[in-house]
Image (cartoon, coloured by chain):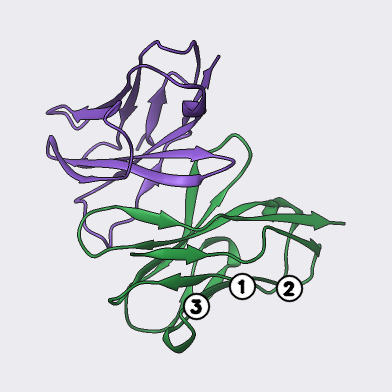
Amino acid sequence: KAGVTQTPRYLIKTRGQQVTLSCSPISGHRSVSWYQQTPGQGLQFLFEYFSETQRNKGNFPGRFSGRQFSNSRSEMNVSTLELGDSALYLCASSLAGQGTDTQYFGPGTRLTVL
Amino acid sequence: AQSVTQPDIHITVSEGASLELRCNYSYGATPYLFWYVQSPGQGLQLLLKYFSGDTLVQGIKGFEAEFKRSQSSFNLRKPSVHWSDAAEYFCAVGQGYGNKLVFGAGTILRVKS
């Protein structure tokens, strides 16, 4: 089975722009979660989608949004980019979105905001 | 609120020596606990997880972890470290509903030959 894929792998944007990141979960997985990883704040939960519905949300401003499609693929969008949004964005998928499920992580998208 | 503390930011171990990485958690209910490893430029890979039952859990790559409720700890151990184990290790706690994980700050493991 193919693992979790994220596109693009690297992205450079300037302040004020917006960006869309994509995540394709493992086939059959219905839950997709997003995390932001920075040297200063570490790994922080952004949001989780299950069956096209946002089920959990972390403490991020409204500039961060996401969605999930009927095939479980997910996108996250960041509007009005700030320098502090530079980070590795990780996507994880799991089968049924239960707390006991194993989450499988993708390689991440490295976003640099100039 | 849930929280995870990994007191050691960096650890250096000689190849072949034993390893213990510390993790303390704070969570009101029975925790779901995880250890992940991240190599440079890679995503996270699950080493092992604990939900209930036997408090000593075995994982991949020869790792094990022991859940101690009285100490709110979930330390990761390996009897003999290999150079390929050099990476960053994250402890995480999950809630019963959904997939939100709260991660510790991570411990960077360096292996010297």
Pointer 1 indicates a residue of which chain? B
Res B94 quadrant in image? bottom left
Relative to residue B91, is residue B55 depicted above or below?
Answer: below
Query: Pointer 2 and pointer 1: residues touching (CB < 8 Å)?
Result: yes
From this viewpoint, is residue A32 visible? no
Residue at 71 percent across and 51 percent down: it is B84
Q: Which residue is mark 3?
A: B73
Q: Position of residue A48 (x, y in %)?
A: 25, 42
Q: Which residue is mark 1?
A: B77
Q: Position of residue B25 (x, y in %)?
A: 45, 71
Pointer 2 indicates a residue of which chain? B
Instruction: Give me the chain that's purple.
Output: A
Q: Which residue is mark 2?
A: B18
User: Which type of secondary structure does the marked residue at label 2 adopt?
Assistant: loop
Instruction: Give me the chain that's green.
Output: B
Q: Say which amino acid is labelled 1.
A: Arg
Residue at 39 percent across and 84 percent down: it is B54
User: Which type of secondary structure does the marked residue at label 1 adopt?
Assistant: strand
Residue at 20 percent across and 28 percent down: it is A67
Q: Quadrant of the C terminus of chain A?
A: top right
Q: Are marks 1 and 3 on the same chain?
A: yes
Dot 1 alpha-carbon crowd within 10 angstroms: few under 14, some 14 to 19, many 20 or more: some
Q: Earlier in the sequence, mark 2 or mark 1?
A: 2
Q: Position of residue A81 (x, y in %)?
A: 41, 18
Alpha carbon separation for disc pair 3 and 2: 19 Å
Q: Position of residue A61 (x, y in %)?
A: 31, 33
Q: Say which amino acid is labelled 3.
A: Ser
